[in-house]
């Protein structure tokens, strides 16, 4: 059973517009969430994270929103740039004992930002 | 350069052969993990380690062994390669301990083909 779901395999947006990537989870033990970006032939790169005690975390053009009651999080990119074109992975961990070492990943969403 | 180094980048094995994928990090991170990425499957955890001398199984451990004799190194051994182990393998390390804003640092991956 997939515990972290990214239901949109792909998303296409225009440069300068907002990109919204969504992620749902089923395991109520998850309380730390991360987003990674991955270019072809490279390893995933950490983007932004949020713990369950917050509902929003912002870092420059990237904002992650967490709705714990709905078990849903989203990544907003504003404004989108062509260099943002990549696969975005949502990941979650139980954060047991204060550690975030055991990540469960979604299948990823391919974002394409068109000039 | 600081980071996670994986070798080799590419490898072709025959069914039944064994090999070791190397992973080294120079950031003095406590936590290290191995993931595999298959098309349409996201990243799945194979084995992880929370410190030298301590390892544990992840989601898909069968057919793989690990050891952690030093903080820096976390090799992954394929005991008897099978075509189902054809995948891209990523090693990652983390400072862990629930630091928000900090996630795993990934290596650039090893693309393994078993024929």
Image (cartoon, rainbow, N blue to C red):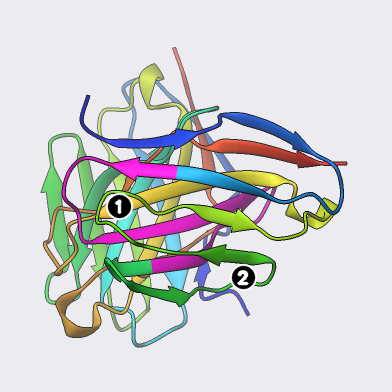
Give how far across and how far down residue B47 sits, in percent.
48, 67
Q: Which chain carries label 1?
A: B
Whether residue A75 appears in magenta in the rendering, the answer is: no
Q: Does residue A76 appear left or right of residue A53 in this picture?
A: right
Dot 1 or dot 2, earlier in sequence = 2
Q: Residue at x 31, y 79 (%)?
A: A94
Tag of residue B93: 1
Element at badge 2?
A: loop
By secondary structure, the bulk of the magenta-drawn segment is best described as strand
Q: Residue at x 40, y 59 (%)?
A: B33
Q: Which residue does the numbered mark 2 point to in the structure image? A: B60
Whether residue B34 appears in magenta in the rendering, the answer is: yes
Give how far across and how far down residue B37 sits, in percent.
60, 50
Q: Are there few (<14), some (14-19), or many (20+) residues within 10 Å of tag 1?
A: many
Give how far across and how far down residue A28 sits, in percent.
37, 87
Q: What stretch is highlighted in magenta?
A: B23-48
Tag of residue A44: none
Q: In which quarter of the image is residue B103?
A: bottom left
- Give the residue furthest to the top: A115
Give how far across and how far down residue B110 sits, in percent.
57, 37
C-alpha distance separating marks 1 and 2? 18 Å
Q: In which quarter of the image is residue B60?
A: bottom right
């Amino acid at each position: 059973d997939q515990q972290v779901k990214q239901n949109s395999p792909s998303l296409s947006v225009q440069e300068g517009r907002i990109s919204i990537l969504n992620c749902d989870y089923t395991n109520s033990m998850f309380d730390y969430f991360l987003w990674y970006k991955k270019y072809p032939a490279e390893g995933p790169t950490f983007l932004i994270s949020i713990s369950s005690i917050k509902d929003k975390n912002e870092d420059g053009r990237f904002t992650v929103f967490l709705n714990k009651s709905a078990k849903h999080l989203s990544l907003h990119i504003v404004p989108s740039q062509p260099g943002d074109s990549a696969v975005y992975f949502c990941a979650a961990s139980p954060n047991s004992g204060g550690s975030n070492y055991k990540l469960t990943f979604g299948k990823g969403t391919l974002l394409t930002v068109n000039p | 350069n600081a980071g996670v180094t994986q070798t080799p980048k590419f490898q072709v094995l025959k069914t039944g052969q064994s090999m070791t994928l190397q992973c080294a990090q120079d950031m003095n991170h406590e936590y290290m993990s191995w993931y595999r990425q298959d098309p349409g499957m996201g990243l799945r955890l194979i084995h992880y380690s929370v410190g030298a001398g301590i390892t544990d199984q992840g989601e898909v451990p069968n057919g793989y062994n690990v050891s952690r004799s030093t903080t820096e190194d976390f090799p992954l051994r394929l005991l008897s390669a099978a075509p189902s182990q054809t995948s891209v393998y990523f090693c990652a390390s983390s400072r862990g301990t629930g630091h928000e804003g900090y996630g795993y640092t990934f290596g650039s991956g090893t693309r393994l083909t078993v024929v």
